[in-house]
Amino acid sequence: GFDTRQLDLLTFGRPGRLAMLRFVIHLGLGRHIGMKGVSTHPFEEVVLPAPLAAPLQLDGDPLPLEPPLRIRLASDRIRLLGRVAPAG
């Protein structure tokens, strides 16, 4: 999280289309944490070895990188600049 200076790894271990649909609905409603089969793991650094059992995603978007991957929290904060999308 932003205040804890840690990243959160979310894993979803329930196979099947119905379980995925249920997860996506709960995710959209912000109720996915605590669902059966959903786990969060706070970390400062994680290494994802190859081969992986499922495709990687970052904030729901495909991450087209080949493992092994090392993901870590930067020591310095970065400033993001951009325009806010208009409502509607």
Image (cartoon, rainbow, N blue to C red):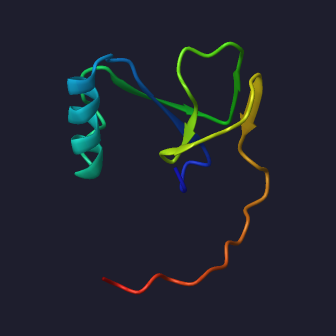
Quarter holding the C terminus?
Answer: bottom left
Q: Above or below — where is 80 with respect to 29?
A: below
Instruction: Please tell me which residue is depicted at 73% across the width and 35% down the height of the picture.
Output: 65
Q: Quadrant of residue 66?
A: top right
In the rendered structure, the answer to whether residue 50 lies left or right of residue 32 reads right
Q: Quadrant of residue 45?
A: top right
Q: How many marks?
A: 0
Q: Above or below — where is 3 with respect to 12?
A: below
Instruction: Please tell me which residue is depicted at 20% across the width and 33% down the height of the picture.
Output: 22
Using the image as rendered, state which of residue 64 and residue 74 is in the foreground.
Answer: 64
Q: Position of residue 64 (x, y in %)?
A: 68, 38
Q: Position of residue 77 (x, y in %)?
A: 73, 62
Q: Position of residue 63 (x, y in %)?
A: 63, 40
Q: Above or below — where is 29 with respect to 50?
A: below
Q: Above or below — where is 50 with respect to 1?
A: above
Instruction: Please tell me which residue is depicted at 62% across the width and 80% down the height of the picture.
Output: 82
Instruction: Please tell me which residue is depicted at 67% across the width and 36% down the height of the picture.
Output: 44
